[in-house]
Amino acid sequence: MVVLTGSSLSLDDVKRVVFQNEHVVLCDMQKQKIDENREVIESLLQDKKVMYGINTGFGKLSDCVIGETDLEELQLNLIHSHACGVGEPFDEKISKAMVLLRANALAQGYSGVRSTLVESLINLINAEISPVIPQQGSLGASGDLAPLSHLALVVMGEGEVFYRGDRIPTEEAFLQAGLHPITLKAKEGLALINGTQAMTATGVITYLEMERLLYQSELTACLTMEGLNGIIDAFDADLHRVRGHQEQMGVASRITNILADSQLTTSQGEIRVQDAYSLRCIPQVLGACWQTVNYAREKLTIEINAVTDNPLIFTDSQKVISGGNFHGEPIAFTMDFLKLSIAELANIAERRIERLVNPQLNDLPAFLSPNPGLESGAMIMQYSAASLVSENKTLAHPASVDSIPSSANQEDHVSMGTIAARHALAMLQNTRRVIAIELICAMQAVEYRGTEKMASSTKDCYERARKVVPSITKDRIFSKDIEHLTQWLKDAEESDVIELKGEVEVYE
């Protein structure tokens, strides 16, 4: 059970709720704090105090004061008018994460909502009902207005949801699950949509998948090392210690441990003096990737526990303050930074694929084909990897350097953080396919070298992966192999289908 306090949610908590369907409950102390905060709103409304978005219009219309009898309609109109998301919907796991993160933000008790609203979000999570939320339409400032409006529709009993494997009207899902819509009171519609939860939820899912993919890449690189009789000296602890980067030392340590009992790696001078950079510099490149991932973890952990709507209500001082906590710049920068490591992970893997298939760069059969010439083997797998890498380069352009004014120039600088997060996730999916291609090629290479000489850890990976993709004995439709192995790697994100990290020591 994950208890929401608004300030203690961890990335592991998100993983357990989203991927393992762990239930969520609102902390009793926070429930009281939320209701006390709501009383401030009610009191100020009775005193006729003008407060942005509570009894005024929105954006450029903030100078329009709304009558007391129209406050509920104001919130309803807000959600209806702002539900302008377009394109394909977010994956339901991202949608579920959005609901969780929005509930956690409101749970801090600064948003002026009723605890009933927070509990309605929690009910969606526990019933495994995920809003259908279009991916496109957010500028990443003023919050993720369009995506979160589609989330808010569901709370009101409108829109569509994913439920029990189907995409159905919210009303139908509520009927099946025994849930009831709520009518939004003053401030509550604005509190639901003024936040960074679309970009942050996408960022969290991307981070979680990237963390595992990095470990998978390290092990896959170890199989490539064996397939190419790579020189193990380049991973010597002393070499990496004098550089000083902890993440680099960690990669070198894990690879050294994985390959400790391999009979396929070589020493410098045994076959060649030095390997190409794509082998020799694995710790330096992947270590730098880990640095960006660690930065992302730090910033995402802060953001999933952040209060990001506007205005905010401070109970003790009775203050209602309009500010800009909804601006997504911290997450926009984070995701643009993470995109660099995702791109480089694919870049260096594709170069190792080339070394595995190019007969001018190794002593293996050309393109790992069992019958070169008559059969092309893995030739076009490298084409596909190169195409994915090139696509990643276009997606890696930083979204955060762009800004388009909106709301009649009232909102004149925006983050584009949701675009950055979406592109990062798309790049990660491309990169997973590149790693799958490398693993297919590496497995074929080690078969030519002799699988009985493999390290125990790489042999275990080989045997598991061979149950998904058989050895290449003749040309076949390799697209299917790539997709099957890609899905196998992805499934490891959500279960213990395979643990590729291994039990290894990392430098402290």
Image: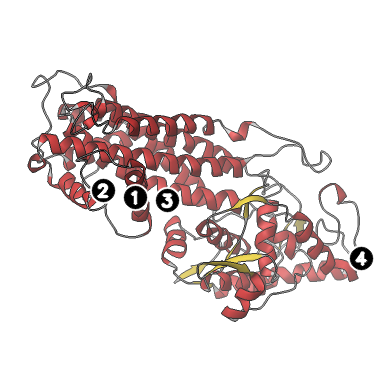
Q: Residue at x 84, y 67 (%)?
A: 73
Cα distance, mark 1 to mark 3?
21 Å
Using the image, determine if residue 453 lies above or below residue 117.
above
CA–CA distance between discs 1 and 4? 59 Å
User: Within 10 Å of the Cα at label 3, are there few (<14), some (14-19), or many (20+) other Cα atoms?
Assistant: some
Q: Is residue 354 visible?
A: yes
Q: Nearer the viewer, mark 3 or mark 4?
A: 3
For label 1, the residue is 484
Which of pointers 4 and 2 lies earlier in the amino acid sequence?
A: 4
Q: Which residue is mark 4?
A: 67
The percent position of residue 203, horizontal first and vertical second, equals: 51, 48
Query: Considering depth in this image, is 474 or 411 the residue closer to the camera?
Result: 474
Sequence-earlier tag: 2 or 1: 2
The residue mark sitting in front, 4 or 2, is: 2
* Quarter occupied by the C terminus: top left
Whichever of labels 3 and 4 marks the residue nearer the N terminus, that label is 4
Provide the residue designation for mark 2. Answer: 469
Q: Which mark is residue 208?
A: 3
The mark nearer the N terminus, 1 or 4, is 4
Name the quadrant containing residue 37: bottom right
- Left or right, 349 with reference to 90: left
The reply to whether discs 3 and 4 touch (Cβ–Cβ < 8 Å) is no
Residue type at numbered disc 2: Val
Q: Amino acid at mark 3?
A: Leu
Please rate how many residues cluster around mark 2, counting C-alpha atoms within 10 Å: few if below 14, some from 14 to 19, many from 20. many
Please give the name of the residue rendered at 74% of the width and 63% of the height, measured from the top-left corner.
Answer: 189
